[in-house]
Amino acid sequence: MMKLVTTSPAMQRIAELVERVAQTDSSVLLLGESGTGKDAFARCIHDLSPRRNQPFVKIDGAALPEDLFESEVFGFEKGAFTGAIESKPGRFEAANGGTLVLDEISNLSLAAQAKLLRVIEERSFERLGGKQAIKIDVRIIALANVDMKEAVRAHTFRNDLYYRLAVVAIELPRLLDRSEDIPVLAEQFVKQFAARNGRTGVQLAKTTLELLLDYDFPGNVRELRNIIERAVLGTNREIIEPEHLPDYLRSANRLMQSRLHKPSLAELEAVYIREVLEYVRGNKTRAAEILGISRKNLYEKMHRYKINLSRAQSVESLCE
C-alpha cells in the first residue's frame, strides 16, 4: 500500500478524503498535472477499499487506438471479426468485483465515451459480436491531466459522463505548490533507491537539497523521483553532492540565480524535456513515458519549444 510522505496541509487533507472515499463504491475523478501521483492515489484508494483483494485493472485512454477500444474494453466473441479465432474477455470483465482505472480519460473519442457511459449506467454490456448481457460490479476511478470542465465546455467530453465519473473529484497539487514536501520526498526516495542497491547511510548534501528547493519541478513528483534515482545510481558515495544532479537542473538553477525573478515553468519544462530526450538518446516513446505524457503531447511540446534533436531522431529510428 502507498505510504503518503508529506508535511503539506493540503496533501494531508487529500489523504483524509481518500481514506473516507475508499470505503465507498463511488466513482472518483483524480485530476492533476502529469507526475503529481494520480496513479499512486488510484492504487491507494483500491488498497484501502473493501475491494482490495479483487482485481485492479487499468485502461490507458491515450494509448488505446479508437478502433480497438470496444474489443479491448468489452471483449469479443469468436468470429466477431477477422482473426477472432476464440472469445476473449475485456478489461471490464477482468476488473469484475474490483477496481477499473480509466487513465487519460479526456483522450477518449465521443463515441467511446457514449459506450462507456452506457456501461456505467446499466452495469452491463455485451462483448463485441455477442448478444448476451454481462453483468459487472466494478468501481471506477478516472484520471485526467487536463481541465475536465473546460473539456465539457468545449464539447470534447460528454457532460453526462463527466458527472458520472466526478461523484468525488480530487485535484492533486503540483509539487511547486507543496514545496515543503520536497525535502521529505527526496529523503524518502534516497532511502528507497539506496536500499534497493544494498546501501545504507546515503544522504543528500545540504547544498544539493538547496538546489532541489530552488527548482520548480515541471515534472512534479515523478521528476523528483527520477532525479534522485539517477543520483543514487550515479555515485557510490554516501553523500549526494550537487555534481550528482542532472546538468539541466543545475543549469536551471544558474538561470534562476542570474535573474531577478525565477524562470517561467515553460523555460524549465523545455530544459527538462531536452535533458530527458538526451538521456534516452532521442527515443521519443521512452521520453514520453518518463515525462508522463503521450507521444503526441511530446511532439507538440518539442514544436512549441523548438527542440530539434537531429541526432535523437536518427537514434530513435533505429530503436523503434
Image (tube, helix red, strand yellow):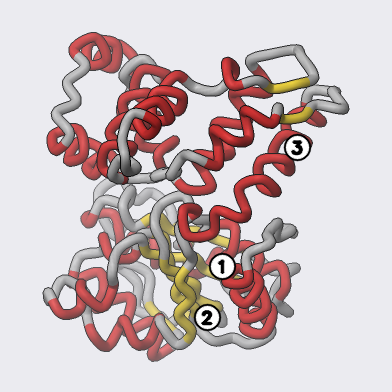
| Real-space Cα separation, disc 1 to disc 3, in angstroms | 30 Å
Q: Give neighbour class at mark 3: few <14, some 14-19, many 20+ (Cα, 10 Å).
A: some
Please give the residue where the numbered disc 1 appears in the rendered image: 95
Which numbered tag is attached to residue 312?
none
> Are the residues flagged by discs 2 and 3 in contact, CB closer than 8 Å?
no
Q: Quadrant of the C terminus?
A: top left
Q: Name the spot of residue 176 as percent of width and height, x first.
A: 46, 53
Report whether 212 appears left or right of 287. Answer: right
Which residue is farthest front? 260
Residue at image coords 34%, 87%: 163
| Real-space Cα separation, disc 2 to disc 3, in angstroms | 38 Å
Q: Name the spot of residue 275 as percent of width and height, x first.
A: 37, 23
Residue type, numbered disc 2? Ile
Q: Name the spot of residue 130 as percent of width and height, x first.
A: 35, 72
Q: Quadrant of the N terminus?
A: bottom right
Please give the residue where the numbered disc 3 appears in the rendered image: 192
Residue at image coords 26%, 60%: 107
Q: Give neighbour class at mark 2: few <14, some 14-19, many 20+ (Cα, 10 Å).
A: some
Please give the residue where the numbered disc 2 appears in the rendered image: 136
Dot 3 falls on a residue whose secondary structure is helix
Residue at image coords 70%, 56%: 5
| Quarter residue 26 falls in | bottom right
| Front-most of residues 109 and 11 | 11
Residue at image coords 47%, 80%: 134
Q: Is residue 151 above or below residue 293?
A: below
Label whose residue precedes the other's in the sequence (1 or 3): 1
Q: Is residue 249 above or below residue 21?
A: above
| Front-most of residues 134 and 316 | 316
Residue type, numbered disc 3? Gln
Report whether 14 appears left or right of 311. Answer: right
